[in-house]
Image (cartoon, helix red, strand yellow):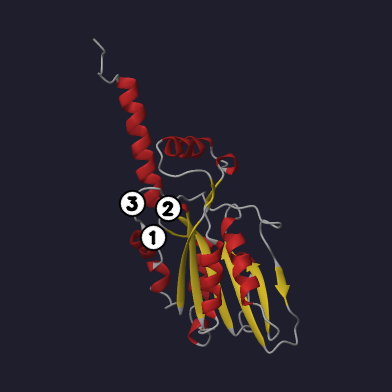
């Protein structure tokens, strides 16, 4: 007769997969924010100084995925009358030249990255005079089972307590386990992939990102 009992080792392995998956989903998958654009962390401008309007698209990213989203948003916003600067949040010191700001971040512990929150906190008074839009990038939105959209939206609450964004965008990220620097985190993500929580690869919806950016023209 076939023995259908489960061994202690199998039980612990299965439990570990489930627990790791739940923990990672609830935290926003800190390191899964990745993509490989031509320049992983773009710093450049589209247009010249003489244009009548100037928009800042700024971002906080760990491995490049959120940076890639920011780059596409900036490219979409550019037009013959508008200069767009695409900079990492840590490179932005002065908002006085801008008519509008779009800021985005990857997720860490269910919140924007610390430098992104610091940026909003530091410039909150300036967002009372110019339009501000916010976007969030995380792998939780790429999970195969369940709808975590409402949960992910709550992760923007710390930003909302400081300033009310004119528009909010929420986009799935991408997963390349080989890029994750921590061995422990790599193992957790491999177990989660084995459990079918999500798959490796780029899960960003570029059409949705461009459509969101195009809609920003009505408020920026």
The residue under the point 53% across, 85% down is 130
Few, some or many residues within 10 Å of mark 1 (<14, 14–19, 20+): many
Mark 2 / mark 3, whichever is N-terminal: 2
Q: What element carries label 1?
A: helix
Mark 1 / mark 3, whichever is N-terminal: 3
Q: How far apart are marks 1 and 3 (CA)?
A: 12 Å
Res. 178 visible in picture = yes
Where 157 sits versus 165, above or below? above
Quarter that holds the N terminus = top left
The residue under the point 40% across, 43% down is 197
Q: Nearer the viewer, mark 1 or mark 3?
A: 3
Q: Relative to 102, is 8 on the left or the right?
A: left
Mark 2 / mark 1, whichever is N-terminal: 2
Res. 97 visible in picture = no
Disc sitting over residue 146 in the figure: 3
The residue under the point 45% across, 50% down is 29
Which residue corresponds to mark 2?
A: 140
Quarter that holds the C terminus = bottom right
Q: What element carries label 3?
A: loop
Q: Which of marks 2 and 3 is in front?
A: 3
Question: Label 3 near label 1: C-beta < 8 Å?
Answer: no
Q: Relative to 1, is 216 on the left or the right?
A: right
Which residue corresponds to mark 1?
A: 152
The residue under the point 50% across, 82% down is 127
Q: Distance between the residues labelled 2 and 1?
A: 8 Å
Residue furthest front as drawn: 1
Question: Label 1 near label 2: C-beta < 8 Å?
Answer: yes
Question: Label 3 near label 2: C-beta < 8 Å?
Answer: no
Q: Distance between the residues labelled 2 and 3?
A: 10 Å
């Amino acid at each position: 007769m076939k023995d259908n009992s489960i061994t202690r080792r199998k039980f612990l392995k299965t439990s570990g997969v489930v627990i790791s998956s739940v923990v990672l989903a609830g935290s926003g998958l800190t390191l899964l924010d990745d993509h490989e654009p031509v320049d992983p962390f773009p710093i450049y401008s589209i247009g010249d100084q003489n244009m009548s309007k100037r928009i800042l698209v700024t971002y906080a990213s760990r491995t490049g995925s959120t940076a890639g989203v920011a780059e596409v948003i900036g490219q979409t916003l550019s037009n013959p009358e508008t200069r767009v600067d695409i900079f990492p949040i840590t490179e932005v010191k002065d908002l006085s030249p801008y008519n509008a700001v779009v800021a985005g971040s990857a997720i860490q512990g269910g919140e924007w990255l610390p430098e992104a929150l610091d940026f909003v906190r530091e410039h909150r008074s300036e967002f009372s005079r110019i339009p501000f839009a916010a976007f969030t990038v995380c792998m939780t939105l790429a999970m195969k089972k369940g709808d975590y959209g409402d949960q992910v939206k709550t992760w923007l609450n710390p930003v909302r307590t400081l300033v009310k964004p004119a528009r909010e965008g929420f986009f799935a990220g991408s997963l390349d386990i080989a890029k994750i620097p921590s061995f422990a985190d790599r193992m957790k993500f491999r177990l989660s992939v084995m459990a079918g929580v999500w798959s490796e690869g780029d899960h960003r919806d570029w059409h949705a990102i461009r459509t969101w950016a195009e809609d920003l023209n009505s408020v920026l």
